[in-house]
Image (cartoon, rainbow, N blue to C red):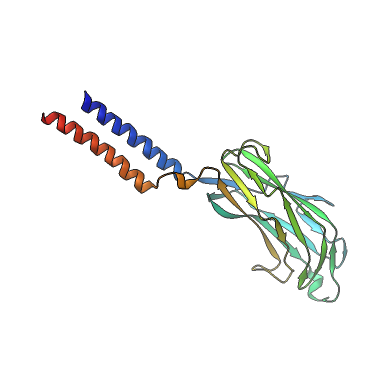
Amino acid sequence: MTSTRSLQFAAVSAIAIFAMAADANAGTITYSTNAAGTEFVSPTTGLTLDSSSGLSATLTFQPDANTITGTPSNINFGIFTLECIPCLTDQVDSAEFSAFSFDLVITDSTDGATGEFVGSSTGGAVAFNASTLTINWSPLQIGDGTSGALTGNFQTTFFAITPTSRIVAPNSGANTGETTVQGGIDSAVSISSVPEPGTLALMGGALIGLGLLRRGKIRGK
């Protein structure tokens, strides 16, 4: 009876440990920024903002569709593209953008929650090789739980955004005129607090071995 109980205990303990290992490796989140609420909300609505005076220029946002990422990770929420075609030939005058605001909606499909970063800008001037446009974001974090949530619950997941996005000049950037909105994703549950999978496997095997050894000793008596 004692040997049976020892073996059962070892097996149950091993299963629990392996379940912990599976949970530790299940830290992937699917998110997107292409919800209907992601757009310029002032002085116009939509994903494209036109310059208010001077040369003709546009600032357009390209949201991210469903993206799967692990936690923690550095991520981006989409790309602003500044285009000023007249600036290519007229390098004396500039395009002027009036103050504007932008709503960036985060959809966490894994946890079933949405939240919103709000960007505000005082506007500025744009030329072929210059831009004074900046966007300041608030809040700087949404989640975990219902913190900053529009709907649902982020559970242990939280998203952070860089405080300021500095819009590059039309002739600048890795891709001409593109500015990536950068941020990060993490979990309130510390991964370091969970043993590594290799350690868990050794612990599970040791428990099973102890159970079998105990059973063999009892049979040998």
User: Residue lying farthest left?
Assistant: 221
Snapshot quadrant of residue 110:
top right
The vertical placement of 75 against 57, above or below, is above
- Is 221 placed left or right of 152 in the picture? left
User: Residue lying farthest right?
Assistant: 53
Q: Quadrant of the N terminus?
A: top left
Give the residue displayed 57% in from the left and 43% down from the top: 157
The vertical placement of 157 against 5, above or below, is below
- Is 17 placed left or right of 146 in the picture? left
Give the residue displayed 59% in from the left and 41% down from the top: 109
Give the residue displayed 67% in from the left and 68% down from the top: 173
How many labels were placed on the picture? 0
Residue closest to the eye, 63 or 187: 187
User: Residue lying farthest top?
Assistant: 1
Q: Position of residue 4 (x, y in %)?
A: 23, 27
Give the residue displayed 33% in from the left and 44% down from the top: 201
Q: Position of residue 93 (x, y in %)?
A: 86, 73
Snapshot quadrant of residue 172:
bottom right
Q: Position of residue 116 (x, y in %)?
A: 70, 45
Q: Quadrant of the C terminus?
A: top left
Residue closest to the eye, 194 or 117: 194
Q: Position of residue 6 (x, y in %)?
A: 25, 29
